[in-house]
Amino acid sequence: MSDDPDSGSIEATDINAAIRGTDPESETQGMTMKSTLTPTGTREFIRAISCAATPVTIVTTDADNLRWGQTVSAVSRVSDEPAILGVCINRRSPMNAAICATGAFNVSLLGPEHHVAADTFAGRSRDGRAPFTFAEGEWADGRNGLPVYADSVAAFECVLHSVTDIGSHHLYLGEVRHVVHTDAEPLLHLRGTYRTLSAHNTEGQLA
């Protein structure tokens, strides 16, 4: 239900769209930056976008009485009114058919102690656990009957609003029907590794 991880993303990427750079060099805030984007610059794009920290989540659904889950870092707030969440999943993943069949999905935001669960649903074997295993005691049913990670930092229960085919991925917009949240810190993905906020505490600084 997931592809092999690459250096820039939790799930592997297969971007077909060409990205063209116009100037060989550009200057940003007094810093000279060399443009490396070309029509075949997929790997450079992935390396560049991996500089942006993203939340580590597990997207879940249930189709034909079978639970499905996949670790996804491409999750974003799209709208507040109505509450809409955006989720991108590689088009090669069988998770796509499950979400479309169910018409709903949940997003569980993981915390720093949830590395094993994140790896499990990214298709890796960890601590003797087979990939994509819903471990007993780690999961509960949300109000919509779909799986929610029981110890998640936050969880979002969504009804499928729309799906758009964009290059290597499908973009799902989900209308959020129910949320739960805590004050715990999230697990982040940055430059191909897991990170936390603790090392750089910015408490009290408004964004």
Image (cartoon, grey):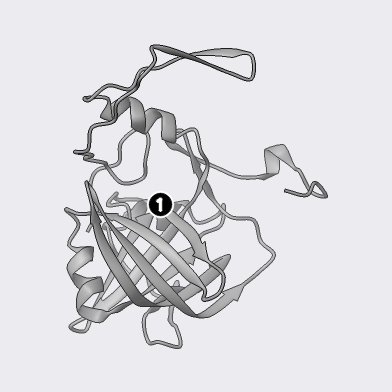
Up/down of 175 relative to 118, above or below: below
Q: In the picture provided, is 77 more to the left or to the right than 123?
A: right
Q: For the point 31% across and 46% down, which residue is it? A: 11
Q: Position of residue 172 (x, y in %)?
A: 33, 64
Count of marks placed on residues = 1
Figure check: 198 above or below 41:
below
Q: Is residue 189 left or right of residue 93?
A: right
* Residue under pointer 1: 74
Secondary structure under the numbered disc 1 in the rendered image: loop
Amino acid type of the residue tagged 1 in the rendering:
Ala
Q: Quadrant of the N terminus?
A: bottom left
Q: Is residue 151 visible?
A: no
The one of 77 and 82 positioned closer to us in this rendering = 82
The structure residue drawn at horizontal position 51% and vertical position 71%, both measured from the top left corner, is 155
Residue 164 locus on image (x, y percent):
26, 61
Please, which residue is most extreme toward the front here? 22
Answer yes or no: is residue 22 visible. Answer: yes
Q: Hey, which quadrant is residue 103 in on the image?
A: bottom left
> How far from the left and from the top, in percent, is residue 54?
50, 47
Q: Quadrant of residue 8?
A: top left
Which residue: 83% across, 50% down?
A: 204
Say few, some or many: other residues with alpha carbon within 10 Å of mark 1 (under 14 / 14 to 19 / 20 or more).
some
- 67 with respect to 113 (left or right): left
- Residue 117 is left or right of residue 187, and the answer is left
> Which residue is nearer to you in this view: 174 or 142?
174
Q: Position of residue 136 (x, y in %)?
A: 39, 74
Q: Residue reaching furthest right?
A: 204
